[in-house]
Amino acid sequence: MNATQTLVALWTLVFKEIKRFTRIWPQTLLPPSITMAMYFIIFGNLIGSRIGEMDGYSYMDFIVPGLIMMSVITNSYSNVASSFFSNKFQRSVEELMVSPMPNWVILSGFILGGMARGLGVGLIVTIVSLFFTRLSVEHPLLTVLVVVLTSALFSIGGFINALMANKFDDISIVPTFILTPLTYLGGVFYSISMLPSFWQGVSMLNPILYMVNVFRYGFLGVSDIPVVWALAAVFAFIVVLFFVALAMLERGKGIRS
């Protein structure tokens, strides 16, 4: 395939993924916004009024970046995991594998589709948050950069999950038992400076902590960890997982019997 054909193939695959989740928007876009609105009401208004300030900001302002990032993570991951596994289950993925499209185009198409949903839901949640607080963005470019990188990282993670899954139940195991706990323990609702030193050290092993803190730094200018370290960690995870996913796809992991 030449460069033009490659771009057409990539765009076609991305467009198909975007059309897939926008066609069923009451299931893919509406529930996350309602869920996050409940978080804003319960944690931000009701509990936040009792907690007061955290790191010099109202509790509502403190948790908003984390909740936006939570929605981006979960939707980027789940979109790719469910979409690619559905292709496996219906055996339509075989048509992609025998097509002249390079494997990196197939992988990139699903990743970009997952990013589109994750970023779209993140934007919706951001708009919803404006009904509860006034957002200020201290570092706009950094904020956009980290949310794009995070959506890419978890889209790749969703792809790997789909490759390894043998049944539909398998694509819910990682989000339920790994992704959700790591997200809640990733500093969304609290600053790790509140924890004892031992648990602060344990928290540093949680990759989501880095993404949430950089995103919060982009909004508020405060972070529990050095921003440069966090960005470097996200970049490293993306590079490693992309090539792992590509190698698995080229070997036909989970596709070829």
Image (tube, grey):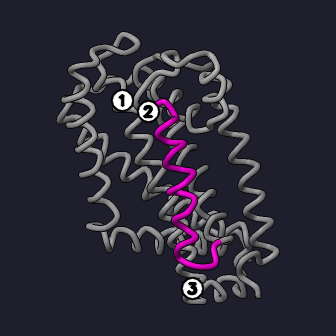
Q: Residues within 10 Å of mark 1 (few under 14, many from 20)?
A: many
From the top left corner, tell me how far across and down residue 238 is, in percent: 68, 47
Q: Which numbered disc, 2 or 1, marks the residue that appears first in the sequence? A: 1
Residue located 38% across and 24% down the image: 137
- Residue 188 circle label: 2
Residue 255 in the image: state x and y as whole percent.
71, 81
Q: Amino acid at mark 1?
A: Ile
Label 1: which residue?
63
Q: Tell me the distance, in whole angstroms, between the alpha carbons under discs 3 and 2.
A: 35 Å
Residue at left 43%, top 25%? 190
Q: Front-most of 68 and 152? A: 68
Membership of 182 in magenta stretch: yes
Residue for point 49% across, 62% down: 78
Quadrant of the image occupied by residue 2: bottom right
Residue type (three-letter) at the residue carrying disc 3: Phe
Element on which disc 3 rests: helix
* Distance from the alpha carbon under mark 3 to that under mark 1: 38 Å
Q: Are marks 2 and 1 in contact (CB under 8 Å)?
A: yes
The prevailing secondary structure element of the residues shown in magenta is helix
CA neighbours of label 3 inside 10 A, class few (<14), some (14 to 19), many (20+): some
Q: In the image, residue 51 lies at what x, y percent? A: 28, 18
> Under tag 1, what secondary structure?
helix
Q: Which mark is residue 89?
A: 3
> Mark 2 is on which residue type?
Val
